[in-house]
Amino acid sequence: MTGELILALIGILLIHQACGCPKECTCNLKTKIVDCRGRGLTDIPTRLQPDTQELYLQNNQIHAVPPWAFREAPSLQVLDLSNNSISILSASSFQGLHSLLVLNLANNSIRDIDSKLFSPTKSLSELNLAFNSIASLPGNLAEDFRNLTRLSVRHNGLQRLDRMLLEPLSKLQALFLHNNPWTCDCQVIGLKLWLERFLFKGGTIDEIRCLQPEDLEGTDLRKVPYEMFQTCPSTNYNYPFSSIHHPDPEPKSSRSHAQDQPAGESVPECEPKQRPQPVNLRYAIATVVITAVVCGIVCLMMLAAAVYGCAYAAVMAKYHRDRKKMDHLAPATEQGCPEEKEPLDRSLA
């Protein structure tokens, strides 16, 4: 009996190893899910099935993600590494994960992100980088996230975010930026304009409260009036404001003139420049609606005046026709009176 039990256990272990499931994890061969949550892991587990689609590694003590850490599971679609102690990410940590859709790196100790980290994951649709110590995002972020729909960088060390990183994210639906030390100076105008356009298109964002300067501390960036930035140099706000009105912010003639101008020369300070006016898309839409309503009312008034004028003209025309008829009948009546009196005069004679 004991021998049969030992053989059964050995058979189970062999099957377990043949299935390619890490001994610290629980694997579901039907759903192709590997659950390694809260197992005290310090390294990425091995012996994963190649067709594994979801891998959950949160609530462990993993400190680093080495290169090609998931080469055994190239079909991964969901990878959760949240609530660990990850501080080291190799440029090729996610190499081979071309099918990855959801990546959760929240609540770790990540400070820097290599510019090539997300290059293999161009199909990614959801990325969570919240609760880390990230001070800046890589400049080629947009190139790797053409299909991104949700991005969270809440509770990090971001002070600024260039709008050029966000412009190409055409599929983005939700952006979470809360609780970062935002500096609301002249360089944040581009982000403010992009956020207004994003909201206008139906996007979702959370609060973006300024930390600097002191007079704007605690103020939501979306509520900061554009008048606050009127003292900024034209290089900071001229392009964003003009792009609201014109698809091409700079005329071709200006560009050619700028290219022909020597590098050492600058525009004279006495040259007059038109100061762009503050722009708000919501105010502009409200103005258009109010103008349309006023124009509609004016048109109705003009229509009523036209109807009244036509009715008045018809009444007056009828009145004049009747009066002319009366004027024609009056002389005929006067001429008939002497003829009626003539027989009487003859009888008297």
Image (spheres, grey):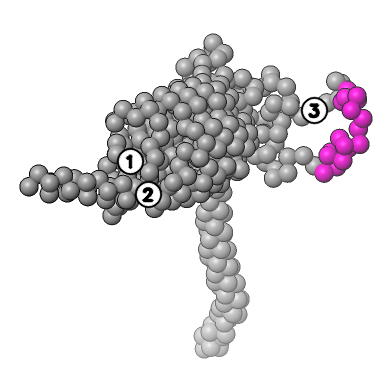
| Residue 134 at x, y percent in the picture | 52, 24
Magenta span covers which residues?
252-268
| Residue 264 belongs to the span the image colors magenta | yes
| Residue 50 at x, y percent in the picture | 41, 51
Q: Secondary structure at mark 2?
A: loop
Identify residue type, mark 2: Gln
| Residue 15 at x, y percent in the picture | 27, 50
User: Separation of disc 2 and disc 3 at Cα?
Assistant: 66 Å
| Residue 271 belongs to the span the image colors magenta | no
Residue carrying label 3: 273
Residue carrying label 1: 22
Q: Residue shown at 83%/26% (left/top)?
A: 272
Q: Residue shown at 80%/28% (left/top)?
A: 273
Label 3 Cα crowd, 10 Å radius (few <14 / some 14-19 / many 20+): few
Identify residue type, mark 1: Pro
Left or right relative to 261: residue 36: left
Q: Secondary structure at mark 3?
A: loop
Residue carrying label 2: 49
